[in-house]
Amino acid sequence: MTQETPEISFVIPVYCEESVLATLNMRLNAAMDGLNAACEVVFVNDGSTDNSLAIMDRIANDDPRYVIVNLSRNYGHQVAITAGIDHARGNAVITLDADLQDPP
């Protein structure tokens, strides 16, 4: 099945955020489901040393709107955002931190 090209890409750098990823996933799904636009989420694993990557893998396997960019080590927030933007396919890109400080 071919997924339509997203209009909106959410780029989210992730570094050791295993404790909030399930909640973030629920909030992102609610936000995307409320939009009248095709969306994608680009998770950028910035060298996490916890279970963040495994959780992101499960999310992406369950929902084709999610993709993962896995950096080989921790490069920092700005590099992770740049990597996500480079992989984003949407006409518009929204950056969002994974720590739930700001709502999707």
Image: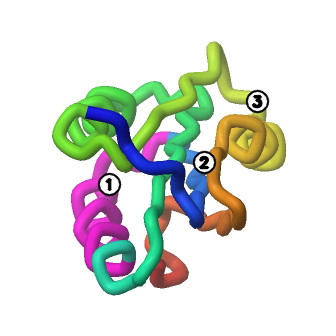
Residue 28 against residue 61 in the figure, above or below: below
Q: Main secondary structure of the magenta part?
A: helix
Seen as rendered, the residue at the extreme top is 72
- SS of the residue at dot 1? helix
Q: How far across and how far down the image is residue 60, in percent?
A: 30, 38
Instruction: Kindly identify the residue that appears in the image at 23 percent across and 68 percent down.
Output: 26
Looking at the picture, tell me which residue is in the foreground, 13 or 1.
Answer: 1
Residues at marks 2 and 3 touching, judged by CB atoms closer than 8 Å: no
Q: Residue at x 45, y 26 (%)?
A: 49
Q: In this figure, which residue is indicated by the disc labeled 1?
A: 21
**Image location (x, y in percent) of residue 23:** 25, 66
* Label 1 crowd (10 A; few <14 / some 14-19 / many >=20): many
Whole-percent x, y for residue 80 in the image: 72, 40
Q: Amino acid at mark 3?
A: Tyr
The residue at which mark 3 appears reads as 75
Q: Residue 81 at what x, y percent from top left?
A: 74, 48
Q: Amino acid at mark 2?
A: Pro
Question: Is 1 placed left or right of 80 in the picture?
Answer: left
Q: Residue at x 60, y 48 (%)?
A: 13
Between marks 2 and 1, how big is the CA–CA gap? Answer: 12 Å
Q: Which residue is mark 2?
A: 13
Q: Are marks 1 and 3 in contact (CB under 8 Å)?
A: no
Callout 2: SS: strand
Return the disc, 2 or 3, that comes first in the chain's sequence: 2
Comes first in the chain, label 2 or label 1: 2
Query: Residue 18: within the magenta?
Result: yes
Quadrant containing the N terminus in the rendered view: top left
The residues tagged by marks 1 and 3 sit, at their Cα atoms, a distance apart of 20 Å
Task: Locate residue 104 relative to residue 89 in the image: left or right.
Answer: left
Q: Which residues are magenta?
A: 16-31
